[in-house]
């Protein structure tokens, strides 16, 4: 029979065991590679840094690697978006050619837009021309999400790290308005499911429009009409989630007008569709 004293001892041992297992979870390791302006290839100097970084790391201990490419603000958004992808891909190709890991993913995130890091100088910011390589030793948390076929892609959201983005594939609006079409409801429902399943997750809803002028695109100065429309479209998704019970503290929204198109010039309907989008950016998790 267990006495109160024995129960206390067992409880204490259990707590110590749990604390020990938590302490054994190794914090993520990370490496930053910096690039010259407009460059994206892996240099011999980069190779030396990567080799030194991986030298004492046990490959089997690494659960996943995130490779994130960035640029500074110099140049237009389309060019910078593509350059950031090239930087991430260069690091990705080099690593998979020389090392073996269980899970590795890459993403080009364009210009660094973290206000805490932003320092604008005429020649750009060398600290923003980079690739972040982040190693995680803890397997990603898996929670069963009851998503429909159209919503399945939203299951990626919890696997993204801070600053990463995902485009909402099925959010559309009535022409020149911030009124979502009926089919958009399914993606908003999917976002709600993800947020409910991951209560620490916070994100920013970003609105973009198509069909702006070359001047707006090149100057990065939003016109009043496009800024209002892109902001109101992001706000429509935001409001849809609030109505479902998500707390305001977990969400914010912003409009980027036509200052960050993915394609320019927009010489096809498909390119216009690419630019006319709502994106989710991870703030914290």
Image (tube, grey):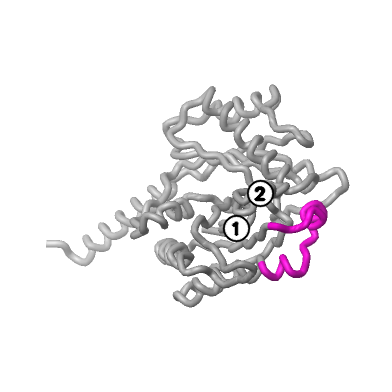
Q: Which of 197 and 170 is in front in this view?
A: 170
Q: Position of residue 226 (x, y in %)?
A: 72, 65
Q: Is mark 1 on a helix, strand or loop?
A: loop
Mark 1, residue position: 277
Q: Which residue sits furthest right?
A: 122
Segment tinted magenta in the rendering: 211-229
Give the residue drawn at x 88%, y 47%: 122
Image position of 45 (left or right of 270)? right
Q: Which of 31 and 144 is in front in this view?
A: 144
Mark nearer the N terminus (2 vs 1): 2
Q: The N terminus lies in which quarter of the figure?
A: bottom left
Q: Where is residue 222 in the image (x, y as percent from the top left)?
A: 77, 62
Give the residue drawn at x 35%, y 53%: 18
Q: Position of residue 11 (x, y in %)?
A: 28, 60
Marks 2,1: beta carbons within 8 A: yes
- 44 up-or-down from 172: above or below: above
Q: Which residue sits furthest front?
A: 268
Which labelled disc corresponds to residue 262? 2
Q: Which of 28 and 198 is in front in this view?
A: 198
Kindly indicate the quadrant of the structure image that contains residue 69: top right
């Amino acid at each position: 029979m267990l006495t109160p004293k024995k129960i206390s001892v067992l409880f204490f041992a259990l707590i110590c065991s749990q604390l020990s297992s938590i302490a054994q979870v190794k914090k993520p390791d990370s490496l930053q590679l910096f690039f010259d302006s407009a460059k994206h290839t892996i240099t011999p100097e980069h190779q030396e840094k990567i080799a030194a970084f991986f030298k004492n790391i046990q490959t089997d201990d690494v659960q996943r690697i995130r490779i994130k490419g960035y640029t500074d603000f110099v140049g237009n958004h389309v060019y910078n978006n593509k350059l950031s992808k090239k930087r991430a891909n260069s690091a990705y190709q080099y690593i998979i050619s020389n090392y073996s890991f269980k899970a590795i993913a890459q993403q080009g995130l364009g210009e660094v837009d973290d206000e805490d890091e932003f320092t604008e100088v005429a020649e750009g910011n060398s600290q923003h021309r980079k690739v972040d390589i982040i190693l995680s030793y803890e397997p990603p948390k898996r929670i069963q999400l009851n998503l429909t076929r159209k919503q399945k892609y939203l299951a990626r959201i919890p696997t993204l790290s801070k600053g990463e983005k995902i485009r909402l594939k099925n959010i559309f609006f009535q022409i020149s308005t911030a009124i979502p079409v009926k089919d958009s409801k399914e993606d908003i429902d999917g976002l709600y499911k993800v947020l409910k399943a991951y209560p620490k997750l916070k994100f920013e809803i970003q609105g973009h429009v198509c069909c702006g002028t070359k001047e707006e695109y090149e100057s990065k100065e939003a016109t009043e009409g496009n800024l209002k429309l892109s902001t109101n479209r992001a706000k429509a998704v935001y409001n849809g989630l609030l109505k479902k019970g998500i707390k305001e503290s977990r969400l914010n929204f912003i409009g980027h007008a036509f200052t960050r198109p993915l394609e320019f010039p927009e010489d096809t309907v498909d390119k216009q569709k690419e630019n006319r989008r709502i994106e989710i950016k991870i703030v914290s998790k």
